[in-house]
Amino acid sequence: MDDQSIQSQAIGVFDSGIGGLTVANAILEHLPNEKICYFGDTAHIPYGTKQVPTIRHFCEQISAFLLTRPCKAIVVACNTATAAALPQLRAKWPTIPFVGMEPAVKPAVQASRSHKIGVLATQTTFKSPRYQKLLTRFAKGYTCFENPCIGLVERIEAGEWEHPATYSLLEEIIQPMLINGVDTLVLGCTHYPFVQSAIADIAGEEVEIIDPAPAIARQLARVLAGHTLLQAENISPKHEFWVSGNEDSMRRALTRTRFGSNWEIDIFKGEQG
């Protein structure tokens, strides 16, 4: 296969559901000529409450599927999946560039004036060695307040982004952090930018909210360039979206992205499970 045909292959992006669309949207903005093939594992959401071996199994199956589309690189657009499976994915497919997520602890520390940051993520992310290394490396001398945001992903998947119950849940999560002097919040799950406006309303103008999606898009661009995989042609590709379960949340969420009508969606009918 020649270099040009490889460059024209898609970028695979996957998440437990619609959360990774926030990353895919950032990729589309930063790399508009690239085709995106997205997989939302809606049959198994949420990942944050599952055991690590189970998450790794799902991630390997999804990656194997994306590579059949074919995809030249894969973005693990899920903090939980990255924490659980990224090293194993890279070891299984050493010739494929994998780009993962991690809570934006470093930029939060750089932005904080009070030396107190809040991280919204999942329990699996908080327990991971990857996250603990971030704290050790970048957050010495800082106080980090953590909340696993139980139930928030499910509300976002249901499209309840502006529902009063979602707002109340966010208040329960964020207010204790604010009382303790947090001035920077990290969105450590790709679902959470869907409710960023509510988070900002609760937190107030003095609190900075960090969404890592734009940084991931820039990192992907660097990785593709380093592997000579950037799409050189000025095109408007047709993007693919796949789900393993219900597709309603995906269709609803796509209306809030840059993808417009230039996409198609299908149900995965393989052995993923």
Image (cartoon, rainbow, N blue to C red):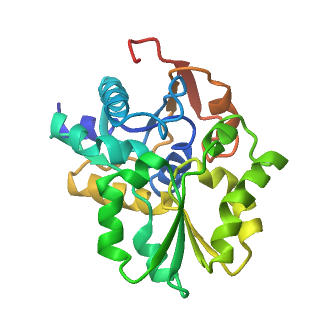
Examine the rendering and report whether any part of residue 163 can be seen. Answer: no
Relative to the observer, which residue lies in front, 224 or 235? 224
On the rendered structure, is 96 left or right of 160? Answer: left
Q: Position of residue 130 (x, y in %)?
A: 31, 56
Tell me which residue sits at (67%, 68%) in the image.
Answer: 176
Q: Position of residue 198 (x, y in %)?
A: 75, 59
Tell me which residue sits at (62%, 47%) in the image.
Answer: 258
| 106 to 173, vertically: above or below | below
Examine the rendering and report whether any part of residue 143 can be seen. Answer: yes
Quarter of the image for the N terminus: give it: top left
Q: To which quarter of the image does residue 68 belong?
A: top left
| 199 to 80, vertically: above or below | below
Relative to the observer, which residue lies in front, 208 or 7? 208
Please tell me how many numbered marks the rendered image carries: 0
Q: To which quarter of the image does residue 72 belong?
A: top left
On the rendered structure, is 172 left or right of 87? Answer: right
Q: To which quarter of the image does residue 109 belong?
A: bottom left
Q: Position of residue 142 (x, y in %)?
A: 44, 80
Quarter of the image for the C terminus: give it: top left
Tell me which residue sits at (50%, 21%) in the image.
Answer: 244
Q: Position of residue 206 (x, y in %)?
A: 69, 81
Tell me which residue sits at (44%, 39%) in the image.
Answer: 35
Relative to the observer, which residue lies in front, 212 or 198? 198
